[in-house]
Image (cartoon, rainbow, N blue to C red):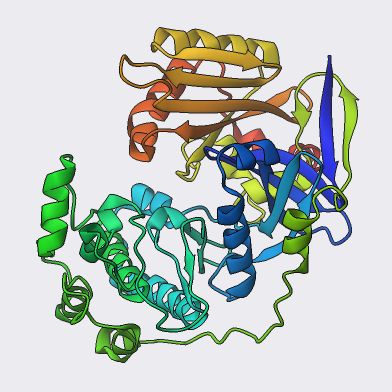
């Protein structure tokens, strides 16, 4: 069997680290600088089929315009004859949402720091005429220093002139959306983003959402009325600010200037000023306007044997700092949308065990080489819950299986699926002993 590794221009392409409806995100490495990046891959046929050219072009242009330390940086855009590649800053710390799932509510001082960074980023976007419209903890990433980075501008709006008018597209995630967005009468993008920031602040301080109902009409009624109650552990100043933000009337809702002057916000506040950079959109125009002439070369390098060999750069990005123990101890594994386990069993045995366990759980199985997709099929929805597993070789006779949610509810994945799934795979999961700390073993894992 021949397994292929790929390069896209100067980027060496590795494992898949994220997957959406229309795109995949892969880990990649700049072979010139050694820098780790995230490579978002969009098939042109899909973009054209779903008439998404303007939306993708707008998203890319916006990310080039809103350069800020607390916003995920877009490095460049490339295109082949069949795909568009968006090269993004690689953020290794996962989503803020995952941290809440793992830790529950966060200490107030930590919440304040994240909120200050969020407001700085949102204020910068608004100064450029950009309104995010889908702010939520899943779209807030944490870097290796613990700093917050706003991501996913797919639903953003760009107004070329300040005060150019109201927005009319109803979009966003229901629990975080402002009441005026639900009215279908037009809304101010800045006020709507501020509301979402308030929901985020409540969520990370409380560990649960201020507005949550399974029944959507009931949820919308509570949002429209601004009907919520704060838990007892909120400080009076924090509670005061949240109530000013979650004001259902956008005309009386506190604005960013007011937030920055609020005593709770001002405590230990260190504003970050973005550097003034000249924005060049030539590569965006080349990708979309001159697609037949401008393209980057794609190359595949064949490798004999089984699953892909994970290189040292990918290994390090999976670990926390240079401590590799989190790779091999499932109990220490940080709760993320992408989870993993390690086995000393042959890859074919791993795949066979995964298939058997999945079928015992009533999941439909699709396997190709060393990648398996599991789906839960119901009478009303096809593939409403899906998981992708891929086996990598990390050392001789040592294999890591990445497990990531491809569709469905994130909380269900962590609390119901993953734990139960791994329990049924105990016979193949390797439990490292003290010899993991042996330098010779670590050397073999990082070479």
Q: Which quarter of the picture shows residue 26? A: top right
Residue 354 seen from this side = no
State how many labels appear: 0
| Residue 376 sits above or below residue 63 on the image | above
Res. 341 visible in picture:
yes
Q: Position of residue 272 (x, y in %)?
A: 53, 85
Residue ID at (45%, 78%): 126
- Name the residue at the bottom extreme: 261
Is residue 81 shown left or right of residue 243?
Answer: right
Q: Quadrant of the C terminus?
A: top right
Q: Quadrant of the N terminus?
A: top right
The residue located at (37%, 48%) in the rendering is 102
At which x and y percent is residue 438? 71, 40
- How far across and down, in percent of the image, does residue 79 sit? 78, 49
Q: Nearer the viewer, residue 367 or 394?
A: 367
Which residue occupies the foreground of this view, 120 or 97? 120
């Amino acid at each position: 069997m021949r397994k292929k590794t790929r390069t896209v221009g100067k980027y060496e392409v590795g494992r898949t680290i994220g997957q959406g409806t229309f795109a995949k995100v892969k880990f990649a490495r700049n072979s010139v600088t050694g820098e780790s990046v995230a490579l978002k891959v969009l098939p042109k046929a899909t973009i054209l089929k779903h008439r998404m050219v303007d939306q993708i072009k707008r998203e890319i242009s916006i990310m080039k315009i809103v350069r800020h330390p607390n916003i995920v940086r877009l490095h460049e855009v490339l295109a082949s004859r069949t795909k568009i590649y968006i090269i993004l800053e690689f953020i290794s710390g996962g989503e803020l949402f995952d941290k809440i799932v793992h830790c529950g509510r966060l200490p107030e001082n930590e919440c304040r720091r994240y909120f200050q960074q969020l407001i700085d980023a949102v204020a910068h976007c608004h100064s450029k005429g950009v309104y995010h419209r889908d702010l939520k903890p899943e779209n807030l990433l944490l870097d290796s220093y613990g700093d917050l980075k706003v991501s996913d501008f797919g639903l953003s709006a760009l107004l070329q002139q300040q005060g150019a008018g109201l927005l009319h597209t109803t979009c966003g995630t229901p629990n975080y959306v402002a009441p005026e967005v639900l009215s279908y009468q037009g809304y101010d993008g800045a006020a709507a983003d501020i509301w979402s920031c308030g929901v985020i602040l409540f969520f990370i301080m409380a560990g649960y959402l201020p507005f949550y109902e399974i029944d959507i009409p009931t949820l919308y009624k509570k949002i429209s009325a601004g009907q919520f109650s704060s838990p007892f552990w909120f400080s009076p100043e924090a509670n005061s600010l949240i109530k000013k933000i979650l004001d259902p009337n956008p005309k009386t809702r506190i604005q960013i200037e007011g937030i920055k002057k609020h005593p709770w916000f001002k405590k230990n506040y260190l504003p970050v000023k973005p550097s003034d950079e000249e924005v060049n959109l030539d590569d965006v125009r080349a990708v979309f306007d001159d697609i037949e002439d401008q393209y980057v070369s794609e190359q595949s390098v064949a490798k004999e044997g089984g699953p892909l060999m994970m290189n040292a750069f990918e290994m390090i990005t999976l670990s926390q700092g240079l401590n590799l123990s989190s790779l091999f101890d499932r109990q220490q594994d940080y709760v993320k949308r992408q989870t993993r386990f390690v086995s000393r069993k042959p890859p074919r045995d791993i795949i066979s065990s995964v298939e058997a366990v999945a079928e015992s759980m009533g999941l439909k199985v699709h396997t190709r080489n060393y990648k398996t997709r599991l789906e839960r099929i119901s009478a009303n929805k096809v593939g409403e819950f899906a998981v992708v597993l891929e086996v990598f070789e990390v050392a001789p006779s040592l294999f890591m299986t990445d497990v990531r949610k491809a569709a469905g509810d994130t909380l269900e994945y962590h609390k119901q699926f993953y734990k139960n799934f791994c329990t049924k795979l105990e016979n193949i999961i390797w439990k490292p002993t003290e010899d993991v700390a042996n330098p010779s073993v670590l050397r073999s894992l990082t070479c």
